[in-house]
Image (cartoon, helix red, strand yellow):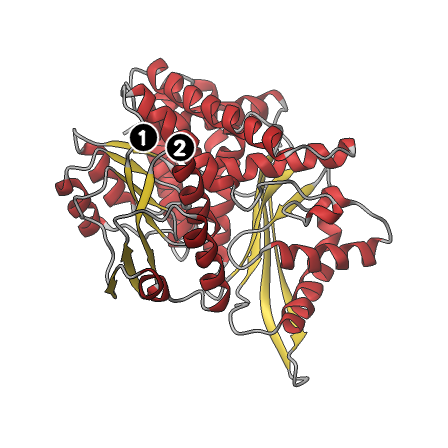
Amino acid sequence: MNQYIKNTIDLIYDMYRTQPEFVQAVEEFLFSIEPAIAKHPEYEKNDLLMRLVIPERLFKFRVVWTDDQGKAHTNTGYRCQFNGAIGPYKGGLRFQKNVNESIIKFLAFEQTFKNALTGLPIGGGKGGSDFDPAGKSEAEIMRFCQSYMTALYRYIGADVDVPAGDMGVSQREIGFLFGQYRRLKGNFENGVLTGKGLSYGGSLIRPEATGYGAVYYLDEVLKHENDTLKGKRIGVSGYGNVAWGIMKKAAELDAKVIYMSGPDGYIRDPDGINTKEKLDYILQMRMNDPMHCKPYAEKFNCEFVEGKKFWGVKDVDIYMPAAVQNDVGFESAKLIGDSGVKYYIEVANMPTTNDALSYLRSCSHMIVAPSKAVNAGGVGVSALEMSQNSERLSWSKEEVDSQLHRMMKNIHEESMKAAETYGLGYDLVAGANIAGFTKVARAMIEQGLF
């Protein structure tokens, strides 16, 4: 291992030993960019890696709100502005009870390079809170969002930091956040948030964008292998907006998702989750009870396996983990490798543990694509929303979808070229990391020590 990388990893372990998600993300990333580090001694001269893995700033604040009975509750809020070398910080807000500093930093770190891959001038950031919207009334969620924004509003802006949605933060929450921002600022700065409603500056296809982009990226991988999406069977973990977008776009391109999973188990629908009735039902099911996908099996008379994951099944052509981080551990990875399936396309943020990812990359029959490239379509469309807001324009669904398609094609090409440049063959994981890293590194060096 390159000594500079080893020294940096040792320091990160010492500094952040209580933040495992962040350390895992940094370690995997640094290992994969080793060929680029070895050829550029100026990175070490400028102490680039330590500057790159320590956030530019991190805000941590108290969020106090009242429930419908008038009782006060206190949560912790975060916003990590990780790297702004190529543009204003950009990244979602996550409201989930397991949110902590480690998760926010890992997400912001990954976001930095994902955003760089889009080719758009946006830096990396992430935020959120350990507030859990599940089981809360709309009024309680509104009061929480208003309190959260009251703590955050001084540190964001269209040219500073532009938050968006993530887990637990949908268009509804963005609306509450924007309303409070507008009240506090006294003006209409709709470029300060993305994922907004269409009535006040939102972009078409934003809910589906990450899933659509993942399928477009997958299509480029298949073309490289002289293969096609037509007739492909896909296993997707999760059934949130991302998985839903994958289902919609796969069906449109003559493929079909036959597996999906939730916290309670997984569904196998051999006919495919590919009709308007099925896709609309998933939205309804998710709204009524986001913790159970079993009702889908009961509604459409298909198989439900309780308490298990479908990793290792052999009747799919493509695995697409699209739920949560660390969803696929080493034992699951061995099942996936043994299944003989050729394509493993990460979609969620860091859905595979480091040891599992290393194992899958070592499987000679398998092509692995990394989440920071595959799921970049979501933030890409958010950046397109920023452009529309700044120009006071509203693009059609077809125009946004066309730009998203072109963006994902370019991300695949840039990742492929970066891997080839450093003699790594068709290594999309290393290629994506190197392509994103070199863009950010160049901007940091050109701007001097900061």
Q: Residue 389 at x, y = what percent?
A: 74, 37
| Furthest residue in direction left, as rendered | 338
Q: Judge whether residue 33 can be spotted in this image.
A: no
Could you say which is closer to the camera, residue 318 or residue 56?
Answer: 318
Q: Is residue 373 above or below residue 183?
A: above
> Mark 2: which amino acid?
Leu
> Mark 1: which amino acid?
Lys
Picture residue at 66% right of the left edge, 37% below the top: 385
Q: Residue 243 at x, y = what percent?
A: 41, 48
Could you say which is closer to the camera, residue 244 or residue 369?
Answer: 244
- Which residue in the structure is indicated by mark 2? 253
- Secondary element at image label 2: loop
Q: Is residue 194 above or below residue 73?
A: above
**Disc 2, disc 1: CB below 8 Å?**
yes
**Label 2 or label 1, whichever comes before in sequence order:** 1
On the rendered structure, is 303 left or right of 90?
Answer: left
Could you say which is closer to the camera, residue 324 or residue 49?
Answer: 324
Is the N terminus in the top left, top right, bottom left or bottom right quadrant?
Answer: top left
Picture residue at 67% right of the left edge, 72% below the top: 139
On the rendered structure, is 222 left or right of 187?
Answer: left
What crowding class fits label 1: few (fewer than 14 Cα within 10 Å), some (14-19), or many (20 or more)?
some
- Which residue in the structure is indicated by mark 1? 230
Q: Residue 70 at x, y = what percent?
A: 68, 84
